[in-house]
Amino acid sequence: MRCSVQDSFWNVKSGCQPGRRPRCGTAVSAAIFAIVIAMIVPPAFSALRNRLSAGDLGKVSCALPLGKLRLEVPEGRIPVAIIAPGSFSPPTLLHLRMFEEARDALERSGNNFAVVGGYMSPVHDAYGKASLAPAHHRLSMAEAAVSDSDWIMADGWECACRDRWTPTVKVVERFAAELNKVAISIGTKRPEVAQVRTVMLCGGDVLQSFNDTKKTGERLWTDKEIEVLLGQHGVVCVGRSEVDLEAWAHESPVLRTHLDNLFFAKPRALSGISSSVVRAHLASNESIRYLVHDKVRDYILDHKLNELPNWQ
Ligand SMILES: Nc1ncnc2c1ncn2[C@@H]1O[C@H](COP(=O)(O)OP(=O)(O)OP(=O)(O)O)[C@@H](O)[C@H]1O
Ligand SMILES: NC(=O)c1ccc[n+]([C@@H]2O[C@H](COP(=O)(O)O)[C@@H](O)[C@H]2O)c1
C-alpha cells in the first residue's frame, strides 16, 4: 500500500510518508490506537461538555416564554406573575413547591390577585456562587423541572442573554416590561396591555438577607433596590424554617415600611430539601429520586453533572 496525500492524519500517526510503504500500518497498532482514542476522547468530551457555557447559551432564545400564561382572569381580579430568581443548581421539588405555596398565598391575601404565570430565573454564572453548574445546564434543568407544570416556566434571559450578573431588581423590571406588552382580559373587558403585576418569590433566607451587609461594608440589597422591589412590585416569601418571618419583618427597619407589598406563605410541611442536599447525595453516590423531578435527575446523570468538581 502506498500513502496518498489524503492519508495525512493517518500518516502522522503511522509514520507513513507519501511515496513510501507505511512502516507500522499493522492491524495490531491500529487496534491499540483505536482503544487509546476510545479511552481518551469520551471523558475529555464529557468534561468539555460540562464546561461549555457560552457556546451552548448562544442557542437560547432571549424572548420571554409566554406559552403557559393565562390571558383571562375573572372580573375584578389583578393579574399577577411570580418571578423566582435563584441559583437552581439543581432545581429541587421544593423549588417547584414554593411556587404552589406562593400562588395560594397571593390569591388568598385579600388583594383580588389572580396568578397568571410563574417564572424560574436561574442566576448568571458571574454571580460567582461556588456551587453553580454552568448556566446552560441550570437552565435546561429548570426547563425540565417545569415541563409538566401548566403555569410555571423557565426563563434564560438573566443567565444566558446578559454578559454579567444582573441585580434582581433589574431582572424583575425586565419581566414587568415584557409581561406588560401582553394583552390580558379582565372579566368581559377587552384585552389590554400593562395589567400584569410582577411579584418576586423567595425563601425566608433570601428575605432575611435584605438586611445583610457584605464584607466590603456595602449592603447586599441597597435601600433603593428594596424600595423598588417592595414599593413597585412586591415580594412573596415562603418560610423555610420555624422562624416567624412576619414578626421579623415588622421589626426590620428596611421592611416594615413596605409590609403592604410583602406576602407570606407558611407551608404546612417544612422540608429541608435544598440544592445543597441534592448535591451532597450525588457526591456520596446516593439516590436523588423524589428530591428532584425525574427529568432533572435524568438530566444530571445523562450529563454527568454529579462529576462536576464543584458538586463534590
Ligand atoms: N425548601 C425551601 N423552602 C422555601 N424556599 C426555598 C427552599 N429551597 C429553596 N428555596 C428558595 O428558592 C430560591 C432559590 O434557591 P437557590 O437555588 O438560590 O438556593 P438553595 O435552594 O438554598 O440552594 P443551595 O442549597 O445551593 O444554597 C431562594 O429564594 C431560596 O430561598
Ligand atoms: N442585590 C441583589 O440584587 C441581590 C443580592 C443577593 C442575591 N440576589 C439574588 O438572590 C438569588 C439567590 O441568591 P443565593 O442563592 O445567593 O441566596 C440570586 O438570584 C441572586 O441574584 C440578588
Image (tube, rainbow, N blue to C red):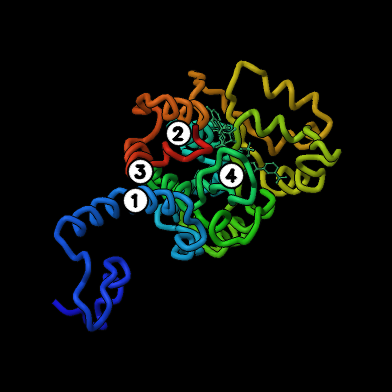
Would you identify the image quadrant in which residue 166 lies?
Answer: bottom right
Q: Which residue is mark 2?
A: 92
Real-space CA distance between mark 2 and mark 4, rounded to the nearest whole angstrom: 14 Å
Of callouts 4 and 3, the N-terminal one: 4
Q: Amino acid at mark 3?
A: Tyr
Which label was assigned to residue 40? 1
Real-space CA distance between mark 1 and mark 4, rounded to the nearest whole angstrom: 39 Å
Q: Amino acid at mark 4?
A: Pro
Nearer to the camera, 127 or 2: 2
Residue 138's spot in the image, x, y percent? 47, 46
**Above or below 254: residue 16:** below
Q: Residue furthest top?
A: 242
Q: Is mark 4 within 8 Å of ligand 2?
A: yes
Q: Which residue is mark 3?
A: 299
Nearer to the camera, 190 or 25: 25
**Above or below 303: residue 8:** below
Nearer to the camera, 196 or 252: 252
Of badges 3 and 2, the one in the foreground is 3
Q: Is mark 2 within 8 Å of ligand 1?
A: yes
**Above or below 64: residue 290:** above
Q: Amino acid at mark 1?
A: Ile
Please indicate, yes or no, whether residue 190 appears anywhere in the rendered image. Answer: no
Left or right of 68 in this view: 224: right
Residue 303's spot in the image, x, y percent? 36, 45
